[in-house]
Image (spheres, rainbow, N blue to C red):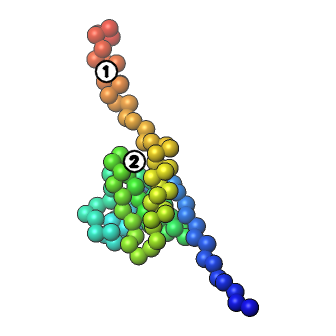
Amino acid sequence: MTSSHTHITEIAIRRAYADDATDLTRLAALDSAAAPPTPPLLVAEIDGVLSVALSLVDGGAIADPFKRTTEALALLRVRAAAHPAPRTRRRHALARINHPALS
């Protein structure tokens, strides 16, 4: 009787944190990118290692070319589409400050 060994890959999706900077720089270098994508970012950890990053601003992505990352990137894109990056409120705040009725 032959037994089949199945490796279950764990993929964790989350927002990038400031302390991910070193890992994102390493990932960009592996992917031959000049720099990580524009923040804010969604990232995927594959088996506990940050392996894919996706910009919520422009959709730019980097991935570890030595891992199977296609599915993780697809998951990040689905997640990004379902939860778009919050838009900045600065424009609205300036509009209120400069509004003629407030002068």
The x and y percentages for residue 94 are 31, 24
Quickly name the residue at label 1. 95
**Residue at position x 28%, y 65% in the image:** 33
| Mark seen at residue 56 | 2
Q: Nearer the viewer, residue 26 or 47?
A: 47
Residue at the left extreme of this rendering: 34
Residue 61: image quadrant is bottom left
Q: Nearer the viewer, residue 7 or 17?
A: 7
Q: CA distance from mark 1 to mark 2?
A: 25 Å
Crowd rating for badge 1 (residues with CA inside 10 Å; few <14, some 14–19, many 20+): few
Which residue is at 30% across, 14% downward? 99
In this rendering, position of residue 7 left or right of residue 103: right
Would you say residue 91 is visible in this rendering? Answer: yes
Judging from the image, what secondary structure is the residue with disc 2 in?
A: loop
- Which amino acid, by three-letter code, is at mark 1? Ala
Q: Position of residue 76 (x, y in %)?
A: 47, 55
Q: Position of residue 14 (x, y in %)?
A: 51, 54
Q: Is residue 75 above or below residue 69?
A: above
Q: Amino acid at mark 2?
A: Leu
Q: Looking at the image, is mark 1 or mark 2 nearer the viewer?
A: 2
Crowdedness near tag 2: few (<14), some (14–19) or many (≥20) residues, C-alpha within 10 Å = many
Residue 8 image offset from top left, x and y in percent: 61, 72
Q: Which mark is residue 44?
A: none
